[in-house]
Amino acid sequence: QVQLVESGGGLVQAGGSLRLSCEASGRAFRNYAMGWFRQAPGKEREFVAAINWSGGITYYADVVKGRFTISRDNAKNTVYLQMNSLKPEDTAVYYCAADFRPFGTNTNVKDYDYWGQGTQVTVSS
């Protein structure tokens, strides 16, 4: 069993930055890959970024590449999402998720085993 708790969301103006955190508890954090997804009102949940167990491999959705950075600190059981140059279209609830296949950077919602409760990010124009 894994518990994931996101934090760091909020309201920011376009062009601004936010840093999301996701702290994990339960099963050993370094045993799984992590991902960030987001869901805007009326839309399906979509992939944002993923990172393998060591942090050595990352993968991004095209729409955030060059603006967002995923990282992890296994000593703190935490994964981060640094979001820069935010746009109104980045507005969504952001979720972190754990994938018990540690070597991958999967992009499909169905590949992930546990999810956090989400944190709201709102970008004003």
Image (cartoon, rainbow, N blue to C red):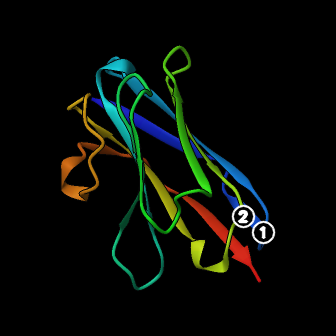
Identify the disc placed on residue 85. 2
38 or 102, nearer to the observer: 102
Q: Quadrant of the C terminus?
A: bottom right
Query: Few, some or many C-alpha atoms within 10 Å of disc 2 (few <14, some 14-19, many ≥20)?
Result: some
x 35%, y 68%: residue: 45
SS for callout 2: loop
Residue 98 lies, in percent from the top left, at 33, 39
Q: Which amino acid does the dot numbered 2 rest on?
A: Ser
Query: Few, some or many C-alpha atoms within 10 Å of disc 1 (few <14, some 14-19, many ≥20)?
Result: some
Q: Is residue 10 above or below residue 35?
A: below
Q: Earlier in the sequence, mark 2 or mark 1?
A: 1
Q: Residue 60 sits in which quadrant?
A: bottom left
SS for callout 1: loop
Q: Residue 21 sits in which quadrant?
A: top right
Residue 10 lies, in percent from the top left, at 71, 61
Q: Which residue is mark 1?
A: 15
Q: Marks 2 and 1, how far apart in space?
A: 4 Å
Q: Which amino acid does the dot numbered 1 rest on?
A: Gly
Q: Quadrant of the N terminus?
A: top left
55 or 78, nearer to the observer: 55
x 77%, y 74%: residue: 14
- Residue 66 is left or right of residue 55, and the answer is right
x 45%, y 30%: residue: 24
Residue 54 lies, in percent from the top left, at 40, 22
- Residue 22 is left or right of residue 105, and the answer is right
Q: Is residue 114 above or below residue 118?
A: above
Labels in figure, total = 2
Residues tagged 2 and 1 counted as in contact (Cβ below 8 A):
yes
x 33%, y 33%: residue: 33
Q: Is residue 25 above or below residue 39?
A: above
- Most extreme residue toward the top is 75
- Residue 61 is left or right of residue 44, and the answer is right
